[in-house]
Amino acid sequence: MSQILVVSNDRGGLADMLSVLNTAGYSASGASTFEEAKRFLADGSPDLVIADERLGAFNGLHIIMRARAEHPHVSAIVTTPVKNRGLEADARDLDIECMVKPQNPAEWLAPLSRSRSPDPSTESRRRGTPCRRTFAGRSRFG
């Protein structure tokens, strides 16, 4: 079972997403602040971190970089409410998947089911992929 950490300052959306993911068989935990996410990372080792672009004074890339410092093989997705070329470029430079956040939490299930078994041959093709509504594979920090 995949352990997923979802970091979002939208508490209602976070609760809905965790419910959908846990019902679908994932082991999902949530954090609504950067500090909460740091505490989770100190105690656990997620397989995947999904983080919103904005987390108060921080952004999702900050918590993902911290996660990878502590857990080098963690996969990561940073989400944005709308297409954001600056975030896309930063995420691409860090080999982090970037996607427009689905409005309905259930829309995460198809992209996440494809991410469970990474295909190394897709890694080079995914680099440079802009924020989009689907998740083609797992990101690896190299």
Image: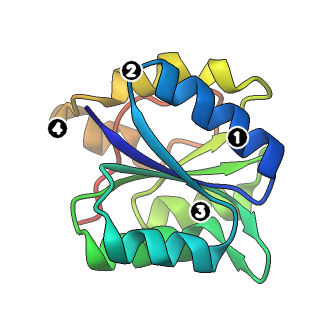
- CA–CA distance between discs 2 and 3? 25 Å
Q: Is residue 101 visible?
A: no
Q: Nearer the viewer, mark 1 or mark 2?
A: 1
Measuring 36% from the left and 21% from the top, which residue is drawn there? 114
Q: Which residue is mark 2?
A: 113
Q: Amino acid at mark 1?
A: Ala
51, 36: nearer the viewer: 36
Q: Amino acid at mark 4?
A: Pro
Q: Earlier in the sequence, mark 4 or mark 3?
A: 3
- CA–CA distance between discs 4 and 2? 16 Å
Measuring 77% from the left and 83% from the top, which residue is drawn there? 57
> The C terminus is located in which quarter?
bottom left
Q: Nearer the viewer, mark 4 or mark 2?
A: 2
Q: Which residue is mark 3?
A: 89
10 Å neighbourhood of mark 2: few (<14), some, or many (≥20)? some
Q: Earlier in the sequence, mark 4 or mark 1?
A: 1
Return the x and y of residue 16 as percentages of the image width and height.
71, 32
84, 57: nearer the viewer: 57
Q: Amino acid at mark 3?
A: Ala
Q: Earlier in the sequence, mark 4 or mark 2?
A: 2
- Secondary structure under tag 1 reads helix
- CA–CA distance between discs 4 and 1? 32 Å
Q: Earlier in the sequence, mark 1 or mark 2?
A: 1
Q: Which residue is mark 4?
A: 120
Q: Nearer the viewer, mark 3 or mark 1?
A: 1
- CA–CA distance between discs 4 and 3? 21 Å
Q: Which residue is mark 1?
A: 15
Q: Nearer the viewer, mark 4 or mark 1?
A: 1
Return the x and y of residue 23 as percentages of the image width and height.
50, 20
Q: Is residue 124 above or below residue 49?
A: above
Q: Earlier in the sequence, mark 2 or mark 3?
A: 3
